[in-house]
Amino acid sequence: MTVSAAVDQYTVLTGDRSKIKDLLCSRLTECGWRDEVRLMCRTILLEKGTNNSFTVEQLITEVTPKARTLVPDAVKKELLMKIRTILTENEEEEADEEMEEDP
């Protein structure tokens, strides 16, 4: 299991994943990223979707790499710090529990 998968699984089990997701959504909205991606989708659809042959899957395939590069570094850093904080708090809680178990 990769570190990313382990962190993902842990955040799902603890319920922190929804908090992280909410934080990400709000930050992306605040910085205008969602509007940029929406505009990018409209532009692509206007250019390529004139005959209704352009599928949602094709749109996602084209937009995803570009959208990922548009996520501001500050948002990435904030999320990383939030994840680190959650993991650190978990380690501290586990250490406290182990100390309580040992007489």
Image (cartoon, rainbow, N blue to C red):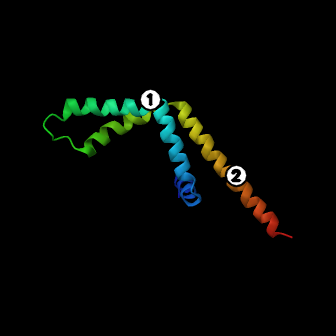
Q: In this view, does 19 lie to the left or right of 87?
A: left
Q: In which quarter of the image is residue 53?
A: top left
Q: Is residue 55 left or right of residue 62?
A: left
> Dot 1, crowdedness within 10 Å: few (<14), some or many (≥20)?
few
Q: Position of residue 58 (x, y in %)?
A: 26, 42
Q: Is mark 2 on a helix, strand or loop?
A: helix
Quick one: which residue is furthest to the left in this view?
51
Q: Which numbered disc flags the more N-terminal residue, 1 or 2?
A: 1
Question: Which of the two marks, 1 or 2, is nearer to us in this view?
Answer: 1
**Residue 40 numbered mark, or none:** none
Q: In this view, does 21 lie to the left or right of 93?
A: left
- Tell which of 78 and 64 is nearer to you: 78
Identify residue for label 2: 89
Q: Is mark 1 on a helix, strand or loop?
A: loop
Give the residue type that dot 1 points to: Gly
**Residue drawn at 83 percent across, 69 percent down:** 102
Q: Is residue 39 left or right of residue 98?
A: left
What count of labels does the image hold?
Answer: 2
**Residue 32 numbered mark, or none:** 1
Q: Calculate the distance from the C-alpha at mark 1 to the C-alpha at mark 2.
A: 31 Å
Give the residue type that dot 2 points to: Glu
Quick one: which residue is furthest to the right in this view?
103
Q: Where is residue 24 in the image (x, y as percent from the top left)?
A: 51, 41
**Residue drawn at 54 percent across, 36 percent down:** 76
Q: Where is residue 30 in the image (x, y as percent from the top left)?
A: 49, 31
**Residue drawn at 62 percent across, 41 percent down:** 81
